[in-house]
Image: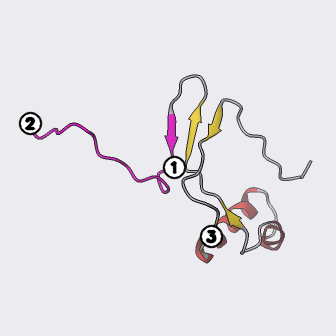
């Protein structure tokens, strides 16, 4: 087993991605590697070896809770939809 292997929570699944893998923009890659270096108390060089800049990523953006069926959306990846009801008739 790899030292940085993550075991996902068995009560959630990732829903299929809506787009294929992509290379992260440089600023996002730097933020990701700095965050992981801090989280795992490793140097950025170690993280850069594990996650090269040209490494493609798949952005899922949604997780579904098994049993209840609730779907959670990643705020930055999934645009919010407006309510289907028109609330203009409500008086306060």
Q: Is residue 31 above or below residue 80?
A: below
Q: Secondary structure at mark 2?
A: loop
Q: Secondary structure at mark 1?
A: loop
Q: Earlier in the sequence, mark 3 or mark 1?
A: 3
Q: In the image, which disc is placed on residue 89?
A: 2
Find the residue positioned furthest to the right: 1
Q: Earlier in the sequence, mark 2 or mark 1?
A: 1
Q: In the image, which disc is placed on residue 47?
A: none
Residue 89 on image: x %, y % = 8, 36
Instruction: Judge left or right: residue 57 versus residue 50.
Output: left
Residue at the image point whose x is 72% and y is 61% from the top:
36
Residue wearing tag 3: 24
Label tally: 3
Q: Earlier in the sequence, mark 2 or mark 3?
A: 3
How far apart marks 3 and 1 lie (CA) works out to 17 Å
Residue at the image point whose x is 59% and y is 74% from the top:
25
Residue at the image point whose x is 64% and y is 34% from the top:
12
Residue 90 on image: x %, y % = 10, 34
Tell me where the magenta segment starts and ends, as one range: 71-92
Q: Secondary structure at mark 3?
A: loop
């Amino acid at each position: 087993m790899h030292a940085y292997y993550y075991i996902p929570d068995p009560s959630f699944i990732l829903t299929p991605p809506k787009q294929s893998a992509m290379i992260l923009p440089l600023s996002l890659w730097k933020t990701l590697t700095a965050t992981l270096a801090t989280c795992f108390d490793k140097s950025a060089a170690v993280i850069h070896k594990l996650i090269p800049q040209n490494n493609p990523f798949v952005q899922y953006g949604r997780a579904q809770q098994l049993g209840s069926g609730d779907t959670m959306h990643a705020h930055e990846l999934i645009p919010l939809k407006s309510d289907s009801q028109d609330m203009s008739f409500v008086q306060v």
